[in-house]
Amino acid sequence: MNSDWMCYHFGIMKYFFYFGLQFRRIINYVSKKLLKAKFFDDFDWNNYTSRDYGPQLDEMRKVNNVLLPSNLEFIENLANFRLNPEIEQLYRRVMELSPKDLLEVGAGAGSNLINLQLLLPTARVAGVELLSSQVDLGKSIFGVRFPQQEIVVADFIKEDIKYLGDYEMVFTNAVAMHLTSRKVKALILKMLSYSRKYVLLHENLTHSHNFLEILLDLNEYTEFQFTIEKPSNSAFGFVIITKN
């Protein structure tokens, strides 16, 4: 009798332990998926310029040059102008690919467009920026050098801005790392639709999305080739997509 009683209770305990373990696995799986998806953006975009971008730009200008001098003649001089190392890395990589025209998604205050127009003087440059406050900041800081005609204020993912035309390269700088994984996929697909050849994402590859997983997932729906380049001396690197 005692033996039967023990076996019965042992079976009940085993049953609850098994289903408890399975329930815990389900909870852990869902939690990881929710964390991985990052359903909420990292920033409150309504206050991003005043709270984050503006102060960061002020600090950067104390340490590095934000704009190249308008009389820059040779790429070899680039290292002499105390640019932020990641920004210099971006410019050199773009120049290696040497696009005839390029569109920056998330153009911010416009410094990249100003500098890349200097470095690629025959290229057509343009930008799209979500926040008018970013554009206004660029106007106030850069004055006559601000590329006012080349920056459109729009939600690149949601809005149809095909009147801008297409570009040999569509690129971002530190944009995808602030978006949800779902939005990153939508962003890349939209960038591909505006690009004739290259999509380039210059992002923090150390503390950001799993871009390899994202690209493999997208490759099931549209064909392209890609490389992920991570310099050993920087957290930032490149996701470069080449259209077939």
Image (spheres, rainbow, N blue to C red):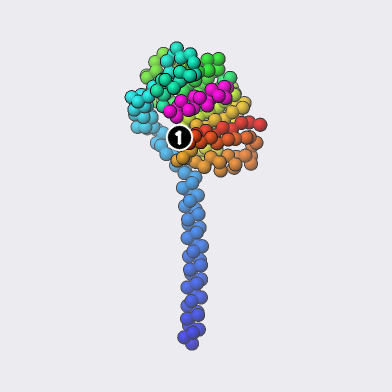
Q: Position of residue 116 (x, y in %)?
A: 49, 20
Q: Is residue 181 above or below residue 156?
A: below
Q: Is residue 244 visible?
A: yes
| Three-letter amino acid code of the residue under disc 1 | Asn
Image point 46% across, 14% down: which residue? 72
- Per the picture, the main secondary structure of the magenta-coloured stretch is helix
Q: Is residue 136 visible in the rendered structure shown here? A: no
The residue lying toward the viewer, choosing from 83 and 123, is 83
Q: Nearer the viewer, residue 66 or 92?
A: 92
Residue that appears at 48% across and 65% down: 20
Question: Which image quadrant for residue 124?
Answer: top right
- Residue displayed at 49% across by 64% down: 21
Local packing at callout 1 (Cα closer than 10 Å; few below 14, some 14-19, many 20+) is few
The residue at the far top in this view is 71
Residue 204 left/right relative to 200: left
Tell me the residue that label 1 is attached to: 233
Residues in magenta? 85-99
Instruction: Give coordinates of residue 63: x percent, y percent.
Output: 35, 25
Q: Residue 51 is drawn in which quadrant? A: top left
Dividing the picture into quadrants, the one containing residue 144 is top left
Q: Quadrant of the image for the C terminus?
A: top right
Residue for point 37% across, 24% down: 64
* Residue 90 is a magenta residue: yes
Q: Is residue 183 magenta?
A: no
Q: For this view, does 101 lie left or right of residue 136?
A: right
Mark 1 lies on a secondary structure that is loop
